[in-house]
């Protein structure tokens, strides 16, 4: 498996761990839906009109009608018929795509499968970085994937991300210490489970540990991006919604990626805070539940 498919596989696996059960949704011919469709592991059949965007993770999309907004599918089976019309962009990341030549796409079309596809989307979405000597393929894909993961986390857990961001602002030092302690415990457990894996007992424990680490990191980074973006929006007096907070946070993350060495220390601190707030929020939820 190539590196790009490996990254897409990790992304899909992480998303399905947090996704709800799949469902079937149909917009029949002549029917008009005015709400956006955000679905996970679902079967979508669109023969009528959707006056909004479609966002699908996993599952299947069959589009024969019209969509006024974007169509974004991740690790999905996508079929775009000859009569289909998309008002903005069509973005398919991984999965399978069958697209009729006569379908209409008013915006851009991206099918992200290979390194060349990622370079194409990067040059369109990040034109000011496209000629930078420091811009490598792996930096592009990591930034792009973290943007998707952070926005998906906000989509799935909007209230939790908001509350965790408030907690981070109230006691940042405590969450920093929680993050350091979490990373130390993770390193000790990782070493222990690696030794145990010699006799096979530690293999499932190792898998669970790594999965827990990445889920905490995904949630924690989404909170950190949201927190940083919210502070920037407040300083600039922007009337912005939660998604823009995350995008502004990702912009800071991107900038740090291309700055000299001291910026790397800030990235490390961001991840320590991410782990800390993830653990702190989990412990807080358990405490309030009891």
Image (tube, grey):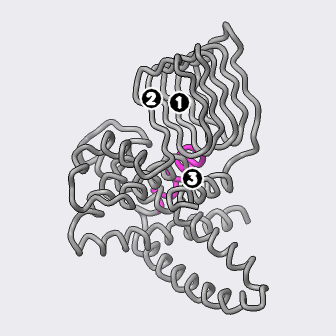
Residue 62: quarter of image: top right
Category of crowding for the residue at label 3, using alpha-carbon neighbours closer than 10 angstroms: few (below 14), some (14–19), many (at least 20): some
Q: Which mark is residue 89?
A: 2
Q: Which mark is residue 269?
A: none
Labels 3 and 1: the sequence-earlier one? 1
Of residues 51 and 28, which is closer to you in this image? Answer: 28
Category of crowding for the residue at label 1, using alpha-carbon neighbours closer than 10 angstroms: few (below 14), some (14–19), many (at least 20): many
Of residues 213 and 8, which is closer to you in this image? Answer: 8
Measured from the top left, where is residue 9 in percent x and y? 60, 57
Left or right of 63, for residue 180: left
Q: Which mark is residue 71?
A: 1
State the CA–CA distance, disc 1 to disc 2.
6 Å
Mark 3 secondary-structure assignment: helix
Labels 1 and 2: the sequence-earlier one? 1
Left or right of 248, for residue 284: right
Measured from the top left, where is residue 183 in percent x and y? 51, 80
Labels 1 and 2 touching (C-beta < 8 A): yes
Residue 156 magenta: yes
Type of secondary structure dominating the magenta stretch: helix
State the CA–CA distance, disc 2 to disc 3.
30 Å
Q: Residue at x 28, y 39 (%)?
A: 238
- What residue would you read off at disc 3? 160
């Amino acid at each position: 498996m190539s590196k790009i498919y490996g990254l897409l596989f990790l992304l899909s696996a992480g998303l399905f761990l947090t996704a709800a059960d799949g469902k079937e949704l149909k917009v029949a011919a002549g029917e008009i839906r005015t709400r956006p469709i955000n679905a996970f592991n679902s079967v979508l059949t669109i023969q009528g009109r959707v006056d909004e965007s479609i966002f699908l993770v996993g599952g299947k999309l069959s589009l024969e009608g019209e969509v006024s907004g974007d169509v974004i599918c991740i690790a999905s089976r996508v079929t775009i018929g000859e009569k289909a019309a998309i008002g903005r962009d069509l973005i398919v990341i991984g999965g399978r795509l069958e697209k009729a030549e006569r379908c209409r796409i008013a915006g851009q079309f991206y099918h992200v499968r290979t390194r060349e596809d990622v370079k194409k989307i990067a040059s369109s979405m990040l034109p000011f970085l496209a000629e930078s000597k420091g811009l490598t393929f792996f930096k592009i894909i990591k930034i792009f994937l973290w943007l998707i993961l952070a926005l998906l986390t906000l989509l799935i857990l909007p209230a939790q991300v908001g509350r965790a961001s408030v907690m981070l602002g109230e006691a940042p030092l405590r969450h920093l210490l929680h993050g350091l302690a979490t990373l130390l415990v993770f390193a000790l457990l990782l070493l222990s489970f690696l030794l145990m894996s010699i006799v096979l007992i530690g293999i499932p424990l190792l898998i669970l540990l790594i999965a827990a680490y990445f889920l905490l990191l995904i949630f924690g980074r989404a909170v950190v991006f949201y927190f940083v973006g919210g502070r920037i929006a407040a300083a600039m007096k922007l009337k912005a919604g939660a998604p823009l907070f995350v995008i502004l946070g990702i912009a800071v993350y991107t900038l740090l990626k291309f700055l000299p060495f001291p910026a790397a220390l800030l990235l490390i601190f961001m991840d320590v805070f991410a782990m800390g707030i993830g653990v702190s929020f989990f412990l807080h939820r358990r405490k309030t539940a009891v």
